[in-house]
Image (tube, rainbow, N blue to C red):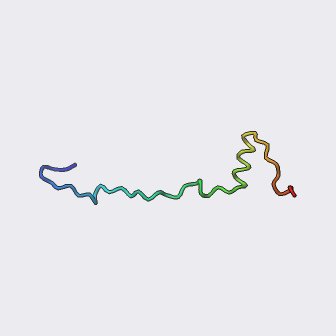
């Protein structure tokens, strides 16, 4: 809180807007497929297709 006649110091209230690393970037394709399978989606095995 500012006192009377105190100048505003932007550095004290600056917010670091750099986004933090999220879990989303750590998800592999296999993890995504397994999750969809738990939701009931039928995912064919991509390794057996020729």
Query: Which x, y percent locates residue 8?
Result: 21, 55
What residue appears at the point 26 percent right and 57 percent down from the top-left corner? 10
Q: Is residue 1 left or right of residue 31?
A: left
Q: How many marks?
A: 0
Looking at the rendered image, the quarter that the C terminus falls into is: bottom right
What residue appears at the point 30 percent right and 55 percent down from the top-left corner? 13
Q: Quadrant of residue 6?
A: bottom left
Q: Quadrant of residue 37?
A: top right
Q: Is residue 37 left or right of residue 23?
A: right
Query: Which x, y percent locates residue 39?
Result: 72, 40
What residue appears at the point 76 percent right and 41 percent down from the top-left corner? 41
Query: Which x, y percent locates residue 7?
Result: 17, 56
Name the residue furthest front.
50
Query: Which x, y percent locates residue 20?
Result: 49, 57
Q: Is residue 34 left or right of residue 3?
A: right
What residue appears at the point 69 percent right and 51 percent down from the top-left corner? 32
Name the residue furthest top.
40
């Amino acid at each position: 809180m500012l006192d009377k006649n105190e100048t505003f110091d932007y550095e004290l209230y600056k917010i670091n807007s750099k986004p933090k690393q999220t879990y989303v970037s750590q998800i592999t394709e296999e993890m995504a497929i397994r999750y969809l399978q738990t939701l009931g989606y039928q995912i064919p095995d991509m390794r057996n297709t020729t």
